[in-house]
């Protein structure tokens, strides 16, 4: 059954308790961190992102279901971990602060490590900082699609000393005197973890751009099934251990193609290319306007990028949501993060109930209560449906209103004859997921503390 739907006038085709966070470093401590030497192009560089389910014979809703399943543990523990991080107290040096780290991302990037370079694929995660891969000799390692890195074969490998600023950036680290190196433990919200030696290596991107002296985790004890789709992880968070920070770049962006397009590749841009690529490639959408909004910082969850969401409109009605619903509280709880590694958007429970109620009242279709899709709100499609009108959906951020294209929040399943809202409810923390971000070039400016949504045909970049 082929169906399509329209939003307004637009017709549309159908981590746990976490150790090893960084604590905000003072300028004197920050000066201890070794910055890598680089021969990257001045304008930055581009990396291809591959969805973990690309190439598989799956429908859009099946991919969404698999993404929800992968992220379920992390979602359930986000709020709880934030509360426990606060419970230790901002000035309590006897307790380990435990901000949540994402992990279990949805996109992979190819890179190479060492000299000579050894290729591997890594999960891209905007919700954490550490770069790591599995290393020999492995005491406990999960199966990965590429050979495990052997540091003995690389002439550019070196261990990070215990007095290094990179070691100091980890809240849970220790000095292994026998190995003369900094040992780390990094645990994610889905029970997965990595433990090993903090080291420095040469990383090669796109087979031609090499950077020496990047700090990374060489993990020899790695547990859980959250990373089996890759051979490690590249953190793009806000801390000093992330790839962005170590490259001393202030901008990066990603442009995600539609989740149902199994052939098109998404892209990650590092450096000034992040904000200039759309015009150069001629992939901007006619008549669409870039929306830029401020990012918030949370000392208790320093890796995350927080948005200042102030309200939501469905159709022509602004939802009756309490102002405090999406606020980032003084104790570090609540708020909304933007996350490329979470599939759908999750709203605090009361807000989602209000959204569902208004959506239902504006749809001309009966509600489907079968629960067959795993999504919270679905409607039954008529067998002869070709075009379905759906209410417009606008997110009101502090500095900009972002109206989403219909395909970024509605998904049809022809096999079961339902049309579903690609959003769900959460407790404590809200998340702006990657389905809602598709076909935008999402530009993070770390110097200005802003994020911009540039409407883009990402498959044309």
Image: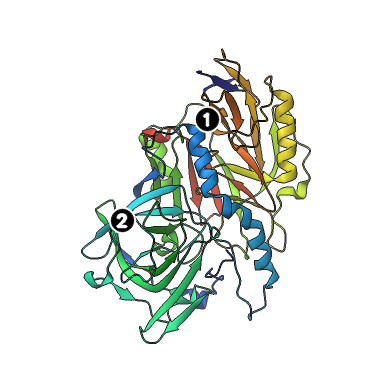
Q: Is residue 299 above or below residue 49?
A: below
Quarter of image, res 350: top right
User: Mark 1 = which residue?
Assistant: 288
Regarding mark 1 in the picture, which secondary structure is present there? loop
Q: Position of residue 316 (x, y in %)?
A: 72, 27
Q: Which residue is mark 2?
A: 120
In three-dimensional space, the C-alpha distance between marks 1 and 2, rounded to whole angstroms, equals 37 Å
Where residue 90 appears, x then y in whole percent?
A: 67, 72
Q: Answer left or right for 419 relative to 30.
A: right
Looking at marks 1 and 2 on the same chain, the residue that comes earlier in the sequence is marked by 2
Q: Quadrant of the C terminus?
A: top left
Question: Which residue is rendered at x = 39% and y = 74% of the image?
Answer: 197
Seen at 48% across and 71% down, the residue is 185
Q: Is residue 9 above or below residue 143?
A: above
Q: Nearer the viewer, residue 121 or 241?
A: 121
Compared with 128, 286 (above or below) is above
Instruction: Choose between 338 and 374: the one closer to the eye.
Output: 374
- Tell me if I can see residue 8 in this picture: no
Which residue is the extreme one toward the top?
A: 384
Residue 117, image quadrant: bottom left
Rendered residue at 39%/33% (across/down)? 57
Residue 231 visible to the viewer: yes
Q: Secondary structure at mark 2?
A: strand
Residue 47: image location, x then y, percent = 35, 48
């Amino acid at each position: 059954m082929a169906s399509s739907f329209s939003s307004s006038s637009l017709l549309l085709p159908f981590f746990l308790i976490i150790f090893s966070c960084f604590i905000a470093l003072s300028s004197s401590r920050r000066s201890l961190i070794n910055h890598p030497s680089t021969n990257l192009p001045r304008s930055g560089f581009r990396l291809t992102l591959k969805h973990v389910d690309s190439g598989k014979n799956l429908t859009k809703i099946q991919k969404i279901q698999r993404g929800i399943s992968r992220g379920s543990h992390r979602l359930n523990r986000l709020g709880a971990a934030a509360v426990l991080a606060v419970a230790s107290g901002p000035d309590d040096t006897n307790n380990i602060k435990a901000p949540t780290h994402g992990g279990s991302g949805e996109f992979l990037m190819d890179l190479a490590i060492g000299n000579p370079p050894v290729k591997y694929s890594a999960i891209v995660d905007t919700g954490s900082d550490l770069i790591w891969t599995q290393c020999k000799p492995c005491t406990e390692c999960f199966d990965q699609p590429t050979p495990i890195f052997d540091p003995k074969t690389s002439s550019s490998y070196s261990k990070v000393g215990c007095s290094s600023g990179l070691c100091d950036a980890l809240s849970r680290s220790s000095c292994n005197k026998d190995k003369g190196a900094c040992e780390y433990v990094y645990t994610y919200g889905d029970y997965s973890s990595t433990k090993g030696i903090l080291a420095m290596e040469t990383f090669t991107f796109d087979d031609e751009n090499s950077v020496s002296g990047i700090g990374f985790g060489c993990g020899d004890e790695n547990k859980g099934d959250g990373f089996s789709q890759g051979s490690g992880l590249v953190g793009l968070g806000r801390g000093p251990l992330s790839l962005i920070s170590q490259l001393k770049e202030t901008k990066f962006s990603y442009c995600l193609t539609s989740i149902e397009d199994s052939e098109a590749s998404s892209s990650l841009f590092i450096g000034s290319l992040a904000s200039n690529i759309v015009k150069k490639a001629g992939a901007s959408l006619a008549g669409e306007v870039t929306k830029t909004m401020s990012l918030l910082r949370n000392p208790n969850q320093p890796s995350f990028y927080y948005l200042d969401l102030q309200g939501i409109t469905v159709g022509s009605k602004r939802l009756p949501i309490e102002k405090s619903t999406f606020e980032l509280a003084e104790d570090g709880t609540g708020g909304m993060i933007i996350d490329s590694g979470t599939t759908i958007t999750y709203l605090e429970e009361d807000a989602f109930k209000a959204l569902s109620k208004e959506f239902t009242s504006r749809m001309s279709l009966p509600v489907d209560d079968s629960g067959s899709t795993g999504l919270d709100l679905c409607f039954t499609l008529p067998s002869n449906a070709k075009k379905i009108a759906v209410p417009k959906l606008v997110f009101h951020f502090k500095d900009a209103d972002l109206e989403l294209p219909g395909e970024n929040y509605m998904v049809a399943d022809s096999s079961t004859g339902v049309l579903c809202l690609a959003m769900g409810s959460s407790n404590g923390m809200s998340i702006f997921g990657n389905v809602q971000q598709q076909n935008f070039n999402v530009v993070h400016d770390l110097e200005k503390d802003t994020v911009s949504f540039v409407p883009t045909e990402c498959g044309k970049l």
